[in-house]
Amino acid sequence: MAFSWWFSRLRSSSRTIFTHFRSSQFQNYTTPSTAVSEVISSKGKNPFLWWSSYLVPISAASLLIQFQSNPSFSDSFDTDSRGVGIGGKGSTEFVVKGSHRSVPQELINDLKAICGENMSMDYEERSVHGKPQNSFHKAVNIPDIVIFPRSEQEVSLIVKSCNKHKVPIVPYGGATSIEGHTLSPHGGVCIDLSQMKSVKALHVRDMDVVVEPGIGWMELNEYLEPYGLFFPLDPGPGATIGGMCATRCSGSLAVRYGTMRENVINLKVVLANGDVVKTGNRARKSAAGYDLTRLVIGSEGTLGVITEVTLRLQKIPQYSVVARCNFPSIKDAADVAIATMMSGIQVSRVELMDEVQVKAINIANGSNLPETPTLLFEFVGTEAYSREQTRLVQKIASEHNGSDFIFAEEPEAKKELWKMRKEALWACFAMEPEYEAMISDVCVPLSQLAELISKSKEVLDASPLICAVVAHAGDGNFHTLILFDPNNEEHRKEAERLNHFMVQAALSMEGTCTGEHGVGTGKMKYLEQELGIENLRTMKSIKAALDPNNIMNPGKLIPPHVCF
């Protein structure tokens, strides 16, 4: 299977993150052969700002923020050969540069006192945490220390000590993000939350659960299954709840159940000064105060470290049907997805794959599927309801040149049909094992989806690179998996050109550069065009108020050229 093949590839490329438990001694990270990259400077500027500020509260409608230095309040940052800021407007860089300064011994002593042996300064451990396996984005520096807290109190003490010494922090979950979220461009401390993975409370009658951030969504659903409940978001395998909150992810079930934004009831977050904030209670709705829960969801670790999450659960459907249908063109397939949503049919999933993606699945699994644009559907509810919805969609598909409409009701048959979508990414890697993937994540209003995919396919098919399209077609979100040789600069430029074309096309249709993967370092350059400079200045004001020393995942989400 392509999925297991990919994991074997991943295992062969790095050690497990738990290797530090096999050693009781810390390695000296200042040894020349394993030292963190040298300090990088650019025209005498320090790319990492150590801000000093204080807050003067005035009215409930505003914040007055006074700073003691740098009156423009714009990040200094490295520039490429054209003078364009890394991550700023017009940037085409994917190697993130940053400044680095040695971690003070006092902080190292503090962290040892807090976590004991649950920290590592081993070069290989730090390198694994500093070079994401699923992302083509890279950073010049890696973290100086990787630490594995086991409780909220430990996280609070770690963050407080890092803030005291003005050392950057990068929260780390399942490492499945693809936009450079977990890079450590300025070194510092990587807080790996994988040891905080317990279920703290399950309220079956309220259909909610309280969990720590390190638990994976797949592990959680295994725990919930005996109770007849499940958590309905399904991003990539290995994703953890904390990381899913940080990136505001979704998945194939978002068309029915919404994104992370709609499925989190409240959070507990450690702020940059070490304070622990709870964003709300367990009531399903509340009009009390600012919605801090939604502020933190999607903040990508730039405002705080999530230490507890209360999630909304769903009943496991009584019955489900999975269907597949082929089409002569990708526009026909997209039109059916739109028509299905417009009909009012409550589908659980609507997933689209182009002919290149189907070919990849055939190669990876030795299957013989028709290599044409394909739609996959899932219908849930009672047996009668699910079958009725299936018949209605079959009729819609037949009106748009659909053929070979098949459906399955038995568990193994449904699993086999759905497997082709679940293994899409790994199947593409099987086509070119040594290549990397640049994955687009554009999303547009549903009515624009067919036009966007059709325009994109014309450009993608003319490219010399292998480009496969997969889409959450029910909510206007589609991905292109662009395979390129990381050692071939022309390949990388071509991949960037294709990605840029799709983003610009989506923005012209009132869409977004990222539907579910988040911004990280890779999408920052598009935010001013999408959101406007006033929006970004507001975001930066919030960031500066909550994190005046800029220690929380610096260099991510907010473009470096934004000033206020």
Image (cartoon, rainbow, N blue to C red):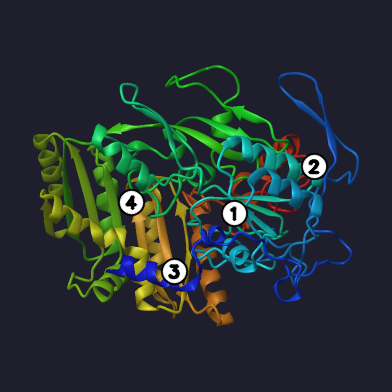
Q: CA distance from mark 3 to mark 2?
A: 37 Å
- Residue on which the image places disc 2: 164
Of the residues shown, which amino acid type is indicated by label 2?
Lys
Is residue 296 placed above or below 291 in the rendered structure?
Answer: below
Which of the 4 image quadrants contains residue 466? bottom left
Residue 459 in view in this figure = no
- Residue on which the image places disc 4: 473
| Residue occupying the point 49% across, 48% down | 511
Q: Could you tell me if the residues under marks 3 and 2 are in contact, i.e. CB atoms within 8 Å?
A: no
Q: Nearer the viewer, residue 22 or 76?
A: 22
Is residue 62 placed above or below 508 in the rendered structure?
Answer: above
Is 324 on the left-hand or right-hand side of 160?
left
Of the residues shown, which amino acid type is indicated by label 4?
Ala
Q: Position of residue 182 (x, y in %)?
A: 59, 56
Q: Earlier in the sequence, mark 3 or mark 1?
A: 3
Of the residues shown, which amino acid type is indicated by label 3?
Leu
Q: Nearer the viewer, residue 241 or 359?
A: 241
Q: Could you tell me if the residues under marks 3 and 1 are in contact, i.e. CB atoms within 8 Å?
A: no
Check disc 1 and report its element: helix, strand or loop.
loop
Q: CA distance from mark 1 to mark 4?
A: 24 Å
Which of the 4 image quadrants contains residue 23? bottom right
- Residue on which the image places disc 1: 520
Q: Position of residue 369 (x, y in %)?
A: 18, 69
| Circle 2 Cα neighbour tier, 10 Å, few/some/many (<14 / 14–19 / ≥20) | some
Is 495 on the left-hand or right-hand side of 228?
right
| Circle 3 Cα neighbour tier, 10 Å, few/some/many (<14 / 14–19 / ≥20) | some
- Residue on which the image places disc 3: 10
Of the residues shown, which amino acid type is indicated by label 1?
Gly
Which of the 4 image quadrants contains residue 162? top right
Q: Earlier in the sequence, mark 2 or mark 1?
A: 2
Q: Nearer the viewer, residue 558 or 457?
A: 558
